[in-house]
Amino acid sequence: MKMYRSHIMICRGTGCSSSNSEQIAKNFEEHIKAHGLQNEVIVERTGCFGLCALGPIVIIYPEASFYSMVKPEDVEEIVKEHLVKGRVVKRLLYAETVTEDRIKSINEVNFYKKQHRVALRNCGVINPENIDEYIAFDGYKALTKCLTELKPQEVIDIIKQSALRGRGGAGFPTGMKWSFAAAAPGNEKYVCCNADEGDPGAFMDRSVLEGDPHAVLEAMTIAGYAIGGNQGYIYVRAEYPIAVKRLGIAISQARAYGLLGKNILGTDFSFDIEIRLGAGAFVCGEETALIASIEGQRGMPRPRPPFPANKGLFGKPTILNNVETYANVCTIINEGPEWFTSMGTEKSKGTKVFALGGKINHTGLVEVPMGTTMREIIYEIGGGCPNGKAFKAAQTGGPSGGCIPESKLDVPIDYDNLIALGSMMGSGGLIVMDEDNCMVDIARFFLEFTCDESCGKCTPCREGTKRMLEILDKITKGQGEMEDIDKLENLAKNIKNSALCALGQTAPNPILSTLRYFRDEYEAHIRDKKCPAGVCQALLQYTISKEKCKGCGICAKQCPATAISGKPKETYVIDQEKCIKCGVCMQKCPFKAISKG
Amino acid sequence: MNELEMKEKMEKLDKIIENHRGQQGALMPVLHETQELFGYLPEEAQKKISKELNVPMAEIYGVATFYSGFTLKPRGEHTISVCLGTACYVKNAQAVYERIQKDLNVKPGGTTADNKFTLVGTRCLGCCGLAPVIMIGEDVYGKLVPDDIPDILKKY
Ligand SMILES: Cc1cc2nc3c(=O)[nH]c(=O)nc-3n(C[C@H](O)[C@H](O)[C@H](O)COP(=O)(O)O)c2cc1C
Ligand code: SF4
Ligand code: SF4
Ligand code: FES
Ligand code: FES
């Protein structure tokens, strides 16, 4: 490969692409050429760096200078100063890297320092549309090793020894799953990849597919070899067009290199992969529903057993793993299972990617060893809540999970501890809420989600979630009664025990966990008819303080409901009957005389 | 769509069906490509798919209505998807959603009178780092406040 003195890595993940990173890349190429540097400096388009909120991100190596929020018109200056004169452009660097005596590299930034990237190893490092770069970073080495040195059973043994557990939600041991499918009779078997990523708030699978698609293809091929399957399917959400495109490119490049298709690497093993698109149904993330969807049916779960390992896609033995699960496989083969088990807790090995979002300073993707505490993730990596607001809860596990309060932030995160806390690992969404979020409203939000997404096949889920949502609606409108809490708890128990699939079985978790840790908020809504966080519209009242009102009348002019009356220089008053609680008056009052509560 | 256009597109549909003939589980990919071609799933197209792939109409209808990504009604020129996922919800996506409804005078799921925009609320778009997020066609806009909306809409 040609050597360059400087590499410019430009993020072409979804986030940065939305703020014009392609134009930035083009401008770099143009200005580099204009300065005759094209043989010394190379522009690389990479996948997501993880800190999407600071995008578009540009990293310049060898210094690893971290430019954030770059604009296309900034490029000329970076080329002239940094690349020609060797002087970094301080004003464009991520502020944390600029210290008095020196410039820090991206690896020293708090957001990255504690991270340990395994599944995300190549994201932001290679150009995902170029198979040669993947190969230069040990790509297809694991596949070569498996096909030429290891028997299928030995591959399964390695995965078993690594104790890798599924990253898609349930945490089932991957090696075990593979061994069931390998043992199942039949010579037609399938390897599926769950890239439906339904948890609203999680986007690690998207980043892996966009930033390192070959890692998934290689691992699926290894899985095919291990179980004796020759065909793979990747089920991707249609909402991820860039991921779909890059997967398509990766598949055709792998075929051209003889790494997919007939007689891979000249062996007698053949394997190919097809992409299938989802169509916006959350329940299709559930394994039996996903299989039905690939078959061309409505994506409804069916009872298990039989498990897909015995009777899956088209009635044949099938394994289904999540994107992030696959993203770990090649490194485990290359580095050995002991290396993998050296990270993590007793029952959860390796690392986990979390999508940090919500009320947090550094939103983005973080990958940390299992056993890291929530406090480390939220405060040391995530930088805490913005605007000096107080932390209230961290939500994990999406619609199947729960809210974890401040008092539990020091618990080491792994599959089992999260369940003990009444939440779930889920796919790794981690949404931070602050004092301005109402926990009853959040529970209602998730119930609305599950109610909407219930496939309707079984009654407990279809009707039960509806009933729970009605009760929560009532409470947030100030019409709740204390018995409603008992009703919620009873319904929750029933649904948990009788729903057909995990969507229904876990749907009550957001309610149960908020009842467990934030019962006082429910009681405030019911007993005092107050929403302590000031979110539930029906319980809000805007009032004008006699002391602070100067009688300017601005509020009355702005009120869309003409609910405010008064005479200039006297205290204005709000007619609560007319007020639609839009909040405009509070925003516009120059004397901060209007408050809600 | 006038008759000529319809005829041309139905011919293209033949090709789509041909490409997928014999493929296991062809229905979903065919429906996706059909929707891309017409912008929705016209009844005529469903009938043809039913005949050629030998899938009963009732089943096609069942599949097409099960998935929120398929639509049986024509959509506007651009689809605006407002993310109502968790990360966006806690950052007040609702206000952005309401602003678009107000500015375009359109209800969720509806299409503007001039047929330019169809507005839908969707689950996570996978750009949660930029919450709140909307997508118009395949263009993503993030870190929005309601006042950003007029300028964005002007681009279309
Ligand atoms: C309602 C529901 C939605 C799910 N959504 C996803 C998803 O989006 N992605 C995923 O990988 N697993 C999802 N799962 C979990 C899958 O059923 C399955 O356990 C997983 O894909 C197996 O892969 P793993 O063992 O590698 O985690 C979902 C499960 C349920 C019940
Ligand atoms: S639990 Fe809900 S989603 Fe699952 S099968 Fe029953 S109705 Fe469908
Ligand atoms: S909250 Fe809105 S409707 Fe109510 S008084 Fe203030 S401006 Fe008027
Ligand atoms: S998309 Fe660029 S950092 Fe995530
Ligand atoms: S929650 Fe809106 S993009 Fe993920």
Image: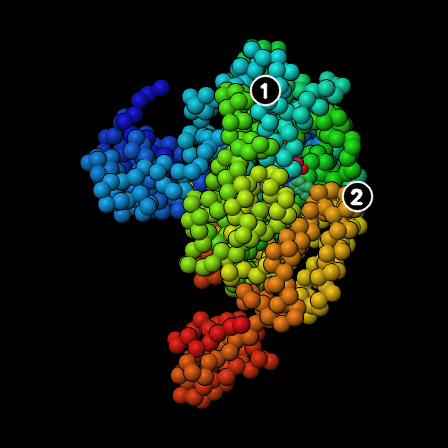
Residue drawn at x 54%, y 41% as measured from the top left: A412
| Chain letter, disc 2 residue | B
Q: Name the residue tied to disc 2.
A: B58
> Would you call the spot at circle 2 few (<14 residues within 10 Å), some (14-19), or many (20 or more)?
few
Q: Give the structural element (helix, strand or loop) at label 2.
A: helix
x then y, percent, for residue A180: 71, 23
Which residue has dot 1 on it? A158
Q: Nearer the viewer, residue A323 or A441?
A: A441
CA neighbours of label 1 inside 10 A, class few (<14), some (14 to 19), many (20+): some
**At x 21% / y 38%, what residue is drawn?**
A87
Q: Residues at badges 2 and 1 in contact (C-beta under 8 Å)?
A: no
Helix, strand or loop status at disc 1: helix
Q: Is residue B74 visible?
A: no
The residue located at (60%, 41%) in the rendering is A417
Please name the residue shown 77% across and 43% down the image. Answer: A500
Tag 1: residue type?
Ile
In the image, residue B40 lies at what x, y percent?
A: 64, 47
Q: Judge whether residue A383 can be spotted in this image.
A: yes
**Dot 2 and dot 1 within a common chain:** no
Q: Position of residue B151 (x, y in %)?
A: 43, 58
Instruction: Give the amino acid type for the residue marked by disc 2 in the picture.
Output: Ala
In the image, residue B122 sits, relative to residue A210, either above or below, namely below
A33 vs A25, left or right, is left
Residue A438, above or below A384? below
Q: Quadrant of residue A197?
A: top right
Residue A595, image x and y in percent? 48, 74
Q: Residue furthest left?
A: A85
